[in-house]
Amino acid sequence: MTDQDAATGDERRAQLAGSLARVRARIAAACAAAGRDRSEVTMIGVTKTYPASDVSLLAGLGVTDVGENRDQEAAGKAAEVAAAGVDVRWHFVGQLQRNKCRSVVGYADVVHSVDSVRLATALAEAARRHRDRPLDVLVQVSIDGDPARGGAVAGSVDIDRGLDLVAAEVARHQPLRLAGLMAVAPLGWEPERAFGRLADIVAGFRVDHPTATALSAGMSGDLEAAIAHGATHVRIGSALLGKRPTLR
């Protein structure tokens, strides 16, 4: 490593430390406003488009949960981080295709985006064949009930996208562990409206799945509203790592 590389690394670490302090302060304030204990909320640093070196720097600052959206980026990054001796908990938070399940089960500790029975079945099969430990799964739920936006639909009897059926498919496969729900606020919805609706869905879901208590909701722009309505995990990208490079 050259002196210039070291200086650049130190500068980036300082940038990340400052951003992390600000995000942690926002989370703490949101928890206090909601009357919740700060320990109830886990921050996931979403590092898509950023290098493995940023993951290592974040780990050194105490960030133990890291999220990725695209398998083609995440798989190599997870391998590079592991080779550097850095231990983090990987969350796959993006849209998952069935043909990527084999790769994802190789590095992910949690998958947030299972939204169909067919995907749950494919993920379970991949986990049985290519994994030697349980895989936590969150079912992605649609807040506005439009499956075209992604997410299983609460109250639907659709044999592939109904929330109850997707959850049941996850729960019945031993390699998978039904951990809870994930959601993204629909475009055009105010966060309070979106996460208030999500809280209603969660309440109904937990009647049948009382141990599936995780709720992944909220990002850089709306984490306060998500925490106010019960989020246990917030997925933070730009507020932590900065404005993302344009994807080509």
Image: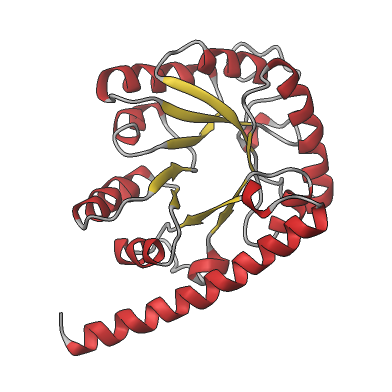
Q: Nearer the viewer, residue 33 or 218?
A: 33
Q: Estimate the x, y position of residue 134 in percent, counting from the top left.
A: 39, 25
User: How many callouts does the rendering have?
Assistant: 0
Residue shown at 71%/45% (left/top)? 186
Q: Estimate the x, y position of residue 93 in percent, counting from the top left.
A: 49, 43
Q: Nearer the viewer, residue 54 or 17?
A: 17
Quadrant of image for the C terminus: bottom left
Rendered position, 37 above or below 140: below
Q: Is residue 38 left or right of residue 155?
A: left
Residue shown at 70%/15% (left/top)? 208
Asked whether the viewer can see residue 175, the reply is: yes
Q: Is residue 79 left or right of residue 42?
A: left
Asked whether the viewer can see residue 248, the reply is: no
Quadrant of image for the N terminus: bottom left
Colour pattern of the rendering = secondary structure
Q: Is residue 129 left or right of residue 33?
A: left
Q: Locate residue 21: give its quadrant.
A: bottom right
Residue shown at 45%/43% (left/top)? 91
Q: Estimate the x, y position of residue 154 in percent, counting from the top left.
A: 73, 23
